[in-house]
Image (cartoon, grey):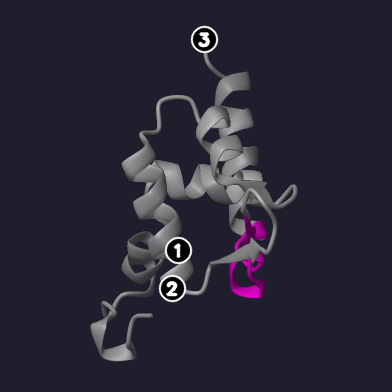
Amino acid sequence: MLKREDLPACPVETTLMLVGSKWKLLIMRNLFVRPWRFNELKNNLTGVSQKVLTDSLRAMEANGIVSRMVFAEVPPRVEYSLTDLGRSMKPILDSLEAWGANYKKNMK
């Protein structure tokens, strides 16, 4: 997890640093619905590479946005879900969705 002194002075920059990539936002979009397994996310997020998905999930877990639950099963099962901190981004993603829908509606 990042330390306070590692964060930019600007709160917007801090937010973008933590969740500002296309893939992180789309991962969060999916995790708002339910917990997902790695391969489910990879198959749903068209164009994401395994490395980018792995790196994004690891960074989001390290920063307290995503939790990783390992089930003691054979074969092993791992699910990713949002933490309370991750779920607190819901109004922001809802606003992005509304803005995108409005933009598409008003395109000529």
Residue 63: numbered disc: 2
- Given contact means CB atoms under 8 Å apart, are the residues at marks 2 and 1 in contact? yes
Res 106 → quadrant: top right
Q: Which residue is mark 1?
A: 60
Q: Which residue is mark 3?
A: 108
Which one is earlier in the sequence, the residue at label 3 or at label 1?
1
- Residue neighbourhood size for the residue with mark 1, other residues' Cα within 10 Å, grouped as few (<14), some (14–19), many (≥20): many
Dot in front, 2 or 3? 2
Query: What's the amino acid at mark 2?
Result: Asn
Res 59 → quadrant: bottom left
Res 14 → quadrant: bottom left
Query: What's the amino acid at mark 3?
Result: Lys
- Residue neighbourhood size for the residue with mark 3, other residues' Cα within 10 Å, grouped as few (<14), some (14–19), many (≥20): few
Query: What's the amino acid at mark 1?
Result: Met
Front one among 73 and 85: 73
Query: In the rendered view, would you say 5 is above or below 96?
Result: below
In the rendered image, the quadrant that contains the N terminus is: bottom left
Q: Position of residue 62 (x, y in %)?
A: 42, 72
Q: State the extent of the magenta-drawn residues as a range.
A: 78-90
- Given contact means CB atoms under 8 Å apart, are the residues at marks 3 and 1 in contact? no
Dot in front, 3 or 1? 1
* Residue at 41%, 66% in the rendered image: 15
Give the side of residue 65 with respect to residue 98, left or right: left
* Helix, strand or loop at mark 1: helix
